[in-house]
Image (cartoon, rainbow, N blue to C red):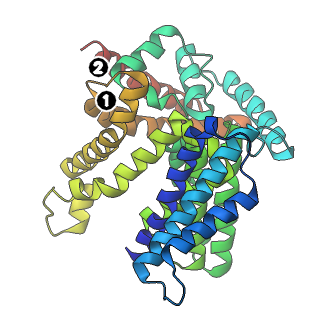
Amino acid sequence: MTGARDFVGVGVPFAAGVAAGILLLPFFPGPITPSLAILLTGAVLFLFLHSGDRLSFHAAQSAIGGIFFLTGIFCGANGAWIGTALPGNEGFPARIATEACQELRMVIDKIPYTSEDVRGLVKALLIGDRSGLNREITDVFRTSGAAHLLALSGLHLGILYLMLLWITAPLGNSRVSRIVRFLLIVSASGFYSLLTGAGPSIVRAFLFILLNEACKLAGREREPLRVLLAGLTIQLALKPGVIASVGFQLSYLAMTGIYLLYPMLESLYPASGNRRLDRWNPLRRIWRGASLTISCQLFTAPVAWFHFRTFPQYFLLTNLIAMPLTSVIMMLSVLTISLSAIGCCPAWLVALDEQAVTLLLGCLRIISGM
């Protein structure tokens, strides 16, 4: 946990500084100049280092935290003054992704689903296009507590990441194979992020994938909390204003809950001593799903209530049913679309995909009517 603590001393002060910079923006007459930032940094060092003294470990940590806090203020205030950070939908890769998204819509439109509700939900889950969803379906997702599934997030990219891991697994584990897998996974994940609009939650998930795969390639230990804080720092450094986004806040809070609370809740279920039995034990899998849902909900509930003034009453039941079904639907839909694009998708696969979507809608309608 030493590495994670080091990142806490960097990532948390930097994030706090970005938030402070945006909140204090009305008090700044103009952008903070680099010279002022250097002056403030020197002042922080002076507070912790006196002439002739050696900097103690704790003083050094405090100084580093103070420096990154001031750096965050610099980035947050200047990012807000500029109005934008990196261009969102400009450049050659983004244009290619936009064209690919249009082609993907056309492929989905040609799939012979018998229900337009199914087609609309497939578009919403895969590319974030909710134009095909009617008011009744949107209300069902909202009242049942599954509205987060309609907003593309790290969950959707995470499911795609699992699929990419399975697809590239046969390449082996040699040095060359690991490099090829890294390039394929990162490229596909990055392209999907651009294709779906690169929202804050999607970008967060992409950074996690990039950092995780980079650690694997380098043979370094992957400490979840370190990845979380590194991703937070990078994302805020690239676009400080994103800290005001609800999606950004909920995404990082949910991941914090998963990393900090989920292991404790999951360990409450007694182990049998047989790893294979524990892995496939249906009751244990249900407990894992419940622990994951509770961990996310407890950490995101205050912010969700602050912004939306609502709290899903049946969130636990909804997520235990909807999360596995959504994963299955996305996998089936990706396979259906891929085979349809080359003109060889069997009718039974289309029917299976449609049945899974229909089952999800049916379950959510029952929950929303409770």
Instruction: Tell me which numbered mark, 2 or 1, is placed earlier along the sequence.
Output: 1
The image shows residue 345, relative to residue 222, as above or below, that is above
Where is residue 23? Give x, y as percent.
55, 38
Q: Position of residue 28 (x, y in %)?
A: 66, 41
- Disc 2 from disc 1: Cα separation: 7 Å
Check disc 1 and report its element: helix, strand or loop. helix
> Which labelled disc corresponds to residue 318?
1
Whether residue 115 is visible here, answered yes or no, is no
What residue is drawn where x is 51% and y is 79%? 49
Is residue 232 rendered to the left or right of residue 256?
A: right
| Image position, residue 236 (x, y; %) | 61, 51
Q: What residue did someone put label 2 on?
A: 367
Residue pictured at 71% horizontal, 39% vertical:
29
Quarter residue 358 falls in: top left
Q: Residue 100 lies in what quarter of the image?
A: top right
Look at 63% across and 73% down and name the residue there.
Answer: 178
Mark 1: which amino acid? Thr
